[in-house]
Image (cartoon, rainbow, N blue to C red):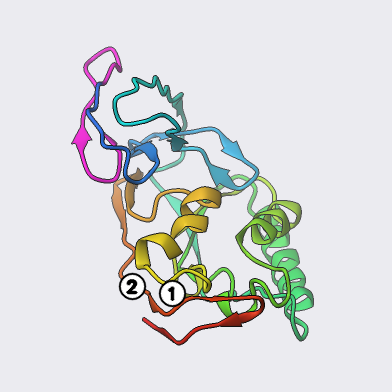
Amino acid sequence: MVSDGTEVTVTDDKGIYELKSAKKWGYVFISVPSGYEVAAEGVFPQFYQTLKGAADVVEQKDFKLTKVDGQDRYKLFLLGDMHLANRTNDAAQFTQFTTDLNAYMAQHSGQKMYALTLGDMTWDLYWYKNNYALPQYRETINRQVKNLQIYHTMGNHDNDPYVASDFGAEGPYRQHMGPVYYAMNIGRIHYIMLDDTEYLNTGGSQGTVGSRNY
């Protein structure tokens, strides 16, 4: 299955697809089928590609799937509310956690493993104050975790606090992390990722965020 975040289609038996898209979300993605994996940039599985042309411009976006074994039984790590913000001792705590995670994976190297975040990888209040937002999170987790595909979901604190609209505030997430709604299959389980928060914010600038509600 292939989607642009609004429309959905399926490939034919040769893997070919066409999708008429308004390109609202700026990407196209596949629902990774059971028994396969996509390539990864560090820990980030590349199941989506960005769309850069206007809606009337045809773009070709191809995806490569690699057949894998071991999905009949696997471990899934659930990572919730990490809130990395370059404040207090959160960096040291995260290093301790990733050290433990890497050690556990090394001890069980023969088993298939994946991870899924539950949102709030960052903390919007400190994006600009501490210069730590989603790009810095990507660098941190790719530096500290290896050989693990981590699928991500968006949390309420992963919105841009300087942008008033919900769709606009999601912009950095779509740019640096990918789709806010998507689905994939690992083994016999179908996972559906939802951005279930409407971000209500008056905006802000120069180190001051407006009133925020979720």
Is 173 left or right of 95, judged from the image as shown? left
Q: Nearer the viewer, residue 143 or 156?
A: 156
Dot 2 or dot 1: first in sequence order is 1
Q: For the point 50% across and 68% down, which residue is it?
A: 158
Could you tell me residue 78's position as x and y percent?
49, 66
The residue segment tinted magenta is: 1-17
For mark 1, give the secondary structure: helix
For mark 2, give the secondary structure: loop
Residue, far top: 14
The reply to whether discs 2 and 1 touch (Cβ–Cβ < 8 Å) is: yes
Q: Quadrant of residue 199?
A: bottom left
* 55, above or below 16, in the image: below
Residue at the spot of label 2: 197
Residue at the spot of label 1: 156
Could you tell me residue 37's position as x and y percent?
46, 35
Q: Quadrant of the N terminus?
A: top left
Please, what is the three-letter code of the amino acid marked with disc 1? Asn
User: Does the stretch in magenta take in 12?
Assistant: yes
Q: For the point 50% across and 75% down, which residue is it?
A: 157
